Amino acid sequence: MQVYTVEGITEADYGCEETRRKEPMALLKLIKDAPDPEEKYVEVTEATLAKQKISEGKKVCFTKDGSILKYIRVVAAVIRDDDKIFATARGYGEYKGWWEFPGGKIEKGETPQQALVREIKEELTADIKVGELIHTIEYDYPEFHLSMDCFWAEVTGGQLVLKEAEAARWLGKNELDSVKWLPADLELVGKIRNP
């Protein structure tokens, strides 16, 4: 998958006296991420930009059918304690009440592992040791593409205290289907169940 950074956004019809377009368009100047930087220009509707919250400096990618999606890279921790796995229920947004593995966005300059340690400390107050990468999930939600690096983890200090989630559970392998998982996390559940 090619990931681009939005370097500039201009009105696609700028300077045209008359157009036959049905809706306002924008012209995006995109720069492909390393190792082989490349410029690309694409037209999208202004409604698409607003719906997906695409702005200058944000990352985007394209679906197989050519649609543009905002690109979000996150990390998730599969925290183990013996044969149990820790899961949380989202406490906000469109997917409120759906279950997920805790984690969050990678900030500029962080490795995925550093981001995961920081996110768990912020969201659950505990210290963790990040283990090996289980899998990277690539999933297209309707309004963005999620790239999620998923790692094994264990608590090394403190208690797991919910600061953002509305609920949490320790689940055995035979209990993984007892909660309603977010779509991307459901893909990870399959990888955990059948390594």
Image (spheres, rainbow, N blue to C red):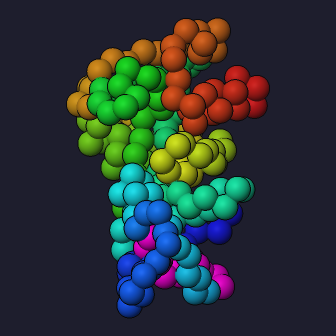
Is 8 located above or below residue 67 in the figure? Answer: below
* Residue found 53% across the figure and 49% down from its top: 146
Give percent across and percent down for residue 81.
50, 22
Q: Is residue 74 magenta?
A: no
Is 10 located above or below residue 169 in the figure? Answer: below
Q: Is residue 29 magenta?
A: yes
Return the residue nearer the eye: 138 or 21: 21
Is 78 located above or below residue 178 in the figure? Answer: below
Q: Which residues are magenta?
A: 25-36
Task: Kindly indicate the quadrant of the structure image that contains residue 152.
Answer: top right
* Residue found 49% across the figure and 41% down from its top: 76
Return the residue nearer the eye: 129 or 162: 162
For residue 172, side relative to residue 126 (left or right): right
* Residue found 65% across the figure and 56% down from its top: 63
Give percent across and percent down for residue 121.
30, 42
**Magenta part mainly helix, strand or loop?**
strand
Task: Kindly indicate the quadrant of the structure image that contains residue 114.
Answer: bottom left
Task: Kindly indicate the quadrant of the structure image that contains residue 174.
Answer: top right
